[in-house]
Image (tube, rainbow, N blue to C red):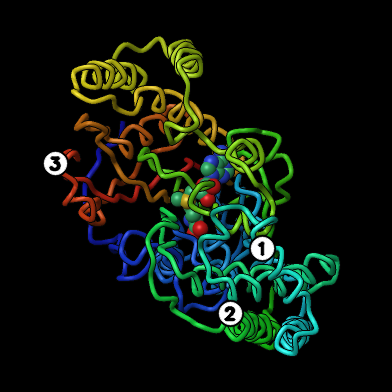
Amino acid sequence: MSSLHAGTASWSSEPGSGRGRSHGTSSREAFDRWFRYPAGFASDYVELLLDRLDLTDGTVIDCFAGSGVTGTAARSRGLSFAGIEAHPAVAELATLKLAPTATGQQVRALASELATKVRGGTGTRAKAGANIGDTEPDLVRRSFSQETLASLIALRDPIKQRIDEPAALYAKWALLATLRDVASVKVGWPYQRPGVARQPRHRDPVARFETRANLMADDLEATAGSPTPSKKISAQVIVGDSSDPAAWSQMTERGVACVASPPYLNNFDYADATRLELFFWGDVSTWGDMCREVRADMLTATTQQSSVGAKETALKELRGRSSDSVGPVSEIVALVDRMVETRLKREKRSKEYDQVAPAYFLSIWDILENLYRQLREDATALWLIGDSAPYGVYIDTPRIIGELAEIVGFSMMDDVRLRERGNRWGQNADRHKVPLTERLIVLTKPG
Ligand SMILES: C[S@@+](CC[C@H](N)C(=O)[O-])C[C@H]1O[C@@H](n2cnc3c(N)ncnc32)[C@H](O)[C@@H]1O
């Protein structure tokens, strides 16, 4: 394995926005301000990384595309983008940002028409208000005042009826982004707590919806009006599982770089984090729907997704892939044993993190293989990833991923410590005290 050196000056640490600091994508940057995805990259940081790679041409890949921040940053640097994202709704948002299907003018006009109708009471507001208790999921009913919910529904229903119009999906996301702005209970990330009241940040849902739609329109117009780039750039968002070669077979370009952040081994549930939006729109209405429709393609990174059977299958597959008695596979197996041992010693019943790790690393291995094939020679892959410590058992996820990457053929060039993380849980007496970090691993595909 290549020598690792932590914290070189050449890879800057993250700027003060984005994940882990204010949780989620930027609320200021064009396009990324459309919807605050809690797991999103800080836009300015991805731009900084791309500048550091000094790319002038080609396609940047993100195998965990999320809300498409790598894509918006690539576009701002005149580069093409190709991404894979497993969360279908979030992939839809990324597609709208990166491969627009409507003009700013169309978005503005539709939002204004819908808002005028709701304000004038000619929409379905009164009727919807009468039925709220019967038709909306519990979480949705409890998150808003009756009047606010009636307005939200009066905006939603006509958008759904007109979903085939070019601007309708933009109106949908303007409305979904409005939900947490006007909620009268705690609906922060990652947990939605409909039992805890708070003052809505914005009181008028219709005005907020229109403001949000107009922001989207501004961004679409600014991009359309910018001087035509001398070269043509493309953007592609594939909805699927990046551990599955079938998703990669749809990718039309090979990559000159990858900037990505995989799920961390920390039980963060990307599907559940968006439950309010999914339930409100009606994509899903039960926990079972969410597992089937939203989580199905995601790699196992939470105890919700794991099982005893899947753990054994993954361990068998991992052992079958490596005859090496000292490599990352034996480290993963040893970590699993330590987690079981520690969990069983705990007084209260604890989550089965030992069931998560084998499937997690197996998927990461598959993803690295797929990525390796899709990258051009001499390409660099930058992965932002944190370590973790379930019940205090330290898992050096970035280093293990780096070692798996080397088995696949990458060279691990650097492992940079960006910052400490996990401090926000410091008050939790049950939580381990192991210091955690956010890291940037730098992989290259040899020429
Ligand atoms: C840390 S977030 C990355 C967010 C992204 N960088 C952004 O700026 O929005 C990880 C993402 O990986 C997605 N994901 C999880 N498993 C996946 C898989 N097997 N294939 C593709 N995407 C996956 C999750 O849904 C989540 O959006």
Checking the image for residue 269, the label placed there is none
Q: Is residue 326 above or below residue 439?
A: above
Q: Quadrant of residue 400?
A: top left
Instruction: Give how far apart the Cα atoms at labels 2 and 1 are.
Output: 16 Å
Q: Is residue 267 above or below residue 215?
A: above
| The N terminus lies in quadrant | top left
Frontmost of labels 3 and 1 is 1
Residue that numbered label 2 is attached to = 205
Inspect the image, locate mark 1, and give the three-letter code of the amino acid beneath it: Ile
In-image side of 2 versus 311 (left or right): left
Task: Give x and y (percent) for residue 25.
Answer: 46, 66
Residue that numbered label 3 is attached to = 433
Sequence-first tag of 3 and 2: 2
Frontmost of labels 2 and 1 is 1
Task: Give x and y (percent) for residue 249.
Answer: 72, 39
Q: Residue at x 44, y 62 (%)?
A: 187
Inspect the image, locate mark 2, and give the three-letter code of the amino acid beneath it: Pro
Circle 1 residues within 10 Å: few <14, some 14–19, many ≥20: some
Residue furthest to the front in view is 130
Q: Determine the secondary structure under disc 1.
A: helix
